[in-house]
Amino acid sequence: MKTTSKSIKTLFKPYLTVKNGYKGGRGISQKKEGQKVYKLSSNENPIGTSPFALKAIKNSLSDLHLYPDTTDIRLREALEVYYKQQLLKEQFICAASGSEIIDLIIRAFVREEDEVIISTPCFVPYKMFSCWSGATVVDVPLFENDYSLNVEGILKSVSEKTRIIFLTSPNNPTGSYISKEELEYLLNELPQDVVVVFDEVYWHFANTDDYTTALPYISNYPNLIAINSFSKTYGLASLRVGYAYMNEEVAAYLRQICKPFLITKLSLEGAIASLKDANFIKETIETIHSEKSFLKVEYNKLGIKFYPTQANFYLINPPIPSNEFVQFLAGEGIAVRPVDNFGANGKVRITIGTREANIALIKALNKLKLISLN
């Protein structure tokens, strides 16, 4: 066999040298004997999983030796019903998580040396997946005082190389949102050949009057794509199911690179069933709104600096350095998320949990306050 001095490393793509991959919200690796642990680090559903989904999953367990559906057509049909025919099944694409949808969109529209605009603090995969494609990521940060969107800054940053702009509302990790007026202005001013990805996975929890999803604008803006997930409201985070809706022609284009058998049988059946579980959705939303109000009062009592939120979490300024704060709460059996890698240096994101979990959190914060005073 002929050998050469060349290394396989010469084939490595230079833009695939990113060393820091995505890190999910962690639990607590070590706990005290008898200690109850509360995971408030990953924005998961505090009340569990849709009972409709659980029943559908259990009914499917006997068929695990069979391949799942080749395509996502049954879930798209269920989504058409869920959206009351405001969207057609041809306007949806589904995949194994919202993150997979993000990757799919980038692969479809971005080439090496193209530009992608993000606004930090934001969901890490926007930047990470864009870098994997060889794109240049242009950051137009949110305004630091309230984490609102810098609309004019985005418009000024658009160039001939811009292919995608990522918007998130409500935003992870800040809880801030984009108003109807801001979204409409941005859509009207942007070139039609720039794809606007509107990540609205937390939309169920938004309750401010000037909030909007992308739904009212899809028919007039073929460059607009909305991303959603079954992880939060429906309690299916471990099954990894996401979907997006858009112009029918764009959906058909994206569907060409969707992998066959992409969604597992259990994920597919669980997602379809969960869309019909109106009571569970209602209970989840009511729990978040009630507990958000409870925490707001308690944070104010403690003097904790927090940011207004339209999501199922709060972003806070911890009273001590964030790494020490996270470690202290871990010792009290509470897992929370530092978000420096999102672009919110020194801040911590805390999921809104059940009343039991939130009381445990407040007790731990009171304990920290007493320790600090002493």
Image: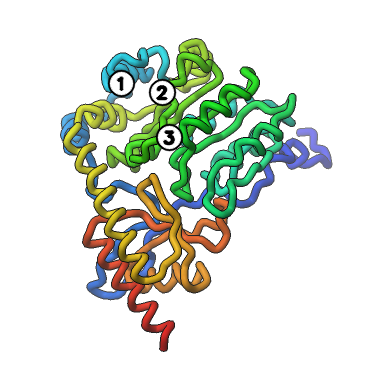
Identity of the amino acid at label 1? Answer: Tyr
Vertical position of residue 319 compared to residue 58: above or below: below
| Residue type marked 3 | Glu
119 left or right of 95 in image: right
Mark 2 and mark 1 residues within 8 Å of each other at the beta carbon: yes
Identity of the residue drawn at 40% across and 70% down: 303
| Residue 139 on image: x %, y % | 66, 42
Q: Count all numbered tags in the image, as a single digit.
A: 3
Residue 295 seen by the camera: yes
Q: Point out the image quarter for the C terminus.
A: bottom left
With 67 as the anchor, is 276 left or right in this view?
left
Residue pointed to by mark 2: 215
Structural distance between the alpha carbons of marks 2 and 1: 10 Å
* Quarter assignment of residue 304: bottom left
Q: Which of marks 2 and 1 is nearer the N terminus?
A: 1
Q: How far apart are marks 3 and 2 (CA)?
A: 10 Å
Q: Mark 1 points at which residue?
A: 83
Of pointers 3 and 2, the one earlier in the residue sequence:
3
Q: How far apart are marks 1 and 3 (CA)?
A: 15 Å
Q: Residue 283 sits in which quadrant?
A: top left
Quarter the N terminus occupies: top right
Tag 1 and tag 3, C-beta contact below 8 Å: no
Of residues 59 and 146, the one nearer the viewer is: 146
Q: Which amino acid does label 2 sit on?
A: Leu
Task: Say what secondary structure mark 3 lies in.
Answer: loop
Q: Where is residue 295 in the image (x, y as percent from the top left)?
A: 31, 60
Q: To which residue does mark 3 refer? A: 200
**Which circle, 3 or 2, is nearer the viewer?**
2
Nearest to N terminus: mark 1 or mark 3: 1
Are there few (<14), some (14-19), or many (20+) residues within 10 Å of tag 3? many
Query: Where is residue 17 drawn, in percent x and y?
Result: 69, 45
- Closest to the observer, 204 or 342: 204
